[in-house]
Amino acid sequence: MLALAITALLAAVWLSFRGFRSEPAGARRMALLAFRCAAAVLLFILILEPGLELRSESRVRARIALLLDTSRSMKFPASPSGPSRAEELQHWFEAHKPDLAKLAARFQIDVYGFDRELQPLDLSRLGADPQGPATDLLGALGGAALAGTGGRPLAGLILASDGADNAELSEGVSPAAAAELRKLGAPVFALPLGAQALKDLAVEKIAVDDFAFVRNQVTVDVVVTARGFGATDVPVILKREGQVVAQKTVHLDGSHSRYDVKLSFVPDRTGKFAFTASVPVYEGEALTQNNQRSFVLKVIRDRVRVLLVVGRPSWDVRFLRQLLKKDPNVDLISFFILRTPGDDPHSSQEELSLIPFPTQEIFQEQLKTFDLVIFQNFNHRPYHMSQYLDGIAAYVRDGGAFAMIGGDQSFSAGDYAGTPIEEILPVTLLPPGPTAVDETLAQLKLSDAGRRHPVTELAAGAGNETAWTRLPKLPGLNTTGPLKGGAQTLLSSGEGRPVLVVGEAGRGRVLALLTDSSWYWSFVAAGEQQGPRAYETFWHSAIRWLVRDPALTPMRVASERPSFEPAGEPPALDVQVRGSDYGAAAGAQISVVTSSAEDPLPHPAGTAVAGPDGSARVLLPQLPPGAYKATVTARRPDGTPVGEAEDAFVVAPSSREMIEAAPRPDLLQAIAAATKGRLIEPGESLGSLPFRDPERVEVGQRTSKPLWDNWKVLALLCLVVGMEWTLRRRWGYA
Amino acid sequence: MFSRRQLLVLPLLFAVRRARAFGEQARLQFAQVRHGGRWDPRPDGLSRLAWEISKRTSIETTPVVKPMGLADPDLFRYPFAVLSSDGGFPAPADNEVAELRRYLSYGGFLLFDDASAQRGGAFEQSARLLVSRVVPGAQLLRIPREHVLYKSFYLLDGPTGRVAATPDLEGLELGGRIGILYSGNDLVGALARDSLGAWEFEVTPGGELQREKSIRLGVNLAMYALCLDYKEDQVHIPFIMKRRRI
């Protein structure tokens, strides 16, 4: 604009000069030109109003952000058996107080503490017991940089941390994170704390479903981190309550820090179990707490695996098989004796579809794979099975289930008296003979226990009794001796002969159905316009009860949560006490013992008294980290036992801060490199760090003074223009 | 006193009581459906089949055959019913058809045995009509040779009977099992004996071998009725395949 104005003025002077360029007198020509130039200059001054600006200026100090890690991982040792990282930071701070004082003369020092959040920190309150729940390095750096926006320029950032980030930089400095770091606009100088304890092996992460299916393979994904290790092989072990269930060796190549390991196993029983994945503790490790992690896995059934052994085909067999085969929750393996040694099929073996009875395979090798074994009108004698009966009894006592269904080859008639099978049955047996069966018609009658028991619940309330008495009479019953202690008759005949008896043997359950005509409750009942519902309901309930379906367990215990914090709220157990007759055990004395994989001895952990509804809550004492099993026993006020139940839980920190706590100087190095900073060497003076030192001038006061903005300039302009006009007229110019 | 037929059955009754009876109803006992036609064309055939089953297999049977009407409530105590004739039979009443429908849907098994062994004959027409009334829209279908029926005890390659009128059995599946089976070869006739114990009918064209195969088919039918698809369980398959190849 200014140049344009000047050009315009020069052009005007030049144009006016052309008017008297032919003037022969050089003095006159020069005088006119001088007047016109003077007029132009004066006009220019009047238009531009030139002036003076007076400013009061001062030089501003840049700032340095000092970020100190206050997360809980700083409580871990800085070196094996050495002081904590927080204490190491305190020592560093004490040693570098003079340095900081010198820096403070050049820069403003802003001090922040950071963990999950960034907050100003008073250095006099720098403690040795940091409590920050997480570490977010990128967030802290960004926050500290932004705090200076519009204020002092940032000369640099000093970051004192163990580098155990569990936020955006937990996986390292990604390209996006590097871009964020570059936006800080200042170098980061990082002081790695705990860098002397670089060696650390950790079970960093475990991924597994909340539940698994029994006899189905479960895969546990374990992430192992190794820092400070060269090439070596490390075993990763998975234990269930102290027992190894899977193991794999991972090869550390020294160039990576994270290794994914898949551990697979097949759970062989249902329940809730505490598992622990662990790696060995090596000498010189920074942390030993993170060498194992525990979790709770609930193992459930996808299908109930039933072994049905049948002495001979019959209608009772056929209707039960049809029911079990149609049940999608049942995996049925059945063996029927289709031909006895006395039968003559008039054919060669090759013309028959019969197979040998694989007694060894099913009663020795496969037995434990079954949830329930049913002997239906089956006599063991012809098949030389005496050698397997002990194993079947042991299988039941160890938590299996067994049902014997009546017939002329069953119970006393099946010659089971005095065998291990009689030991687990809820009834005593008689020697085989004519009294082993009773063919008198039996009208069903529900017992007191049967009214409460889930196995005999066909309908709610009083309708249940009616439902049973309406069913067709049974054509005969097996005869037995007296019931055993703890056994319960759920159904009997009108004259009191037991029809259905249940009991427990060790940890297993046993059912005795003393008839071979339960199919009457299906087909014959259908002929009497009742339908087969009673039969189906009875057998479904019986199987669920036998295999301890959790919904039909009389005594239950459940931990409030699957995992508790080591120093958080104490573990709590909710207990529901019902007797084996399913009545609420009001006033029952409840006692809890806990054991762990590390310490399998049971330790008393709490007591309570069941309320009127049989429920109680038991608070356990605070427990150290580990995987625990709580065993709850209940006794009635008179001391008689009610039952026992178990549950598993874990005491472990849930926060990644306490798990992924290994020092990570490599991460700090990467942060520094991304910002053109560097690591601070041990003992290095802070004054030697190459902070940015930008010139920054701050304007305090500003005043303006116009130079020629007055009437004299205007008068002079008028005088010059008048003189030029006068001379031009006198010399004959227009 | 005893009829000639009952006298014949008596020795069978004692013969099959090899174990102490425990509820007669647990045994396999055939029900013979009484209808408006000649409902008992082979009076001794089913008793003889019961005896053969008992002698050859572990199944306990009762040789006394129970004549029952379709609407008889006691029919539900005999899940294996046989409907036979040597000619057509009058269509059962609606209430009888309804009861038969219930009987079959809750687990009963009905064997149609054509004593006339005439393809497309009067009995076959009556049977097909009854099937269409019991399960509207349904019809009897050929039973494939791979069906478990042909391997439930004996390994058989096809159906037989007194004659070889039809090459296949036909049936109708109800709830995943065969509920109705149609035999067009007078199966029971092949087993019938006279009062002196001699075979009542000549078996053609296969002679005694065909009679033996007929007995075996009868045994397989009983085994299927009581065990259903047991022989299709995985454990049996390799054995059966091996023997089929021999």
Image: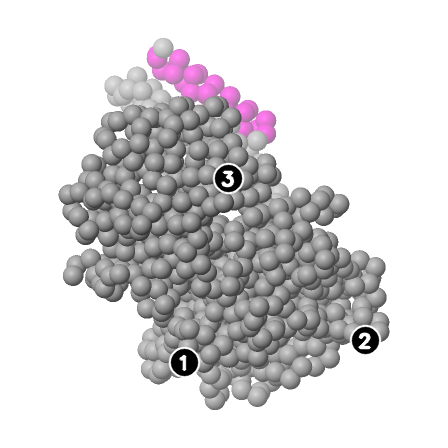
- Whether A726 is among the magenta residues is yes
- Whether A14 is among the magenta residues is no
Q: Nearer the viewer, mark 1 or mark 2?
A: 2
Residue at image mark 3: B75
Closer-to-camera residue (A529/A393): A529
Whether discs 2 and 3 lie on one chain: the answer is no
Query: Which residues, given as a range, are shown in magenta?
Result: A710-733
Residue at image mark 2: A639
The x, y position of residue A726, in whole percent, is 44, 16
Q: Secondary structure at mark 2?
A: loop
Mark 2 burial class by Cα count in 10 Å: few <14, some 14-19, many 20+:
few
Is residue A41 depicted above or below A491 in this figure?
above
Residue reaching furthest to the top: A734
Which color mode does the image show? one colour
> Which residue type does callout 2 highlight?
Gly
Contact between labelled residues 2 and 1, with CB atoms less than 8 Å apart: no
> Which residue type does callout 1 highlight?
Pro
Decide if residue A369 is on the left or right side of residue A413: left
Q: Nearer the viewer, mark 1 or mark 3?
A: 3
Q: Nearer the viewer, mark 2 or mark 3?
A: 3
The x, y position of residue A251, in whole percent, is 34, 78
Q: Residue at x 47, y 42 (%)?
A: B66
In the picture, the quarter occupied by the C terminus of chain B is bottom left
Badge number at residue A235 = 1
Closer-to-camera residue (B168/A282): B168
The subunit letter for the residue under badge 2 reads A
Mark 1 burial class by Cα count in 10 Å: few <14, some 14-19, many 20+:
few
Magenta region, main secondary structure = helix
Distance CA(mark 1)–CA(mark 2)? 48 Å
Decide if residue A446 is on the left or right side of residue A163: right
The x, y position of residue A489, in whole percent, is 69, 62
- Is residue A236 at all visible to an observer of this figure? yes
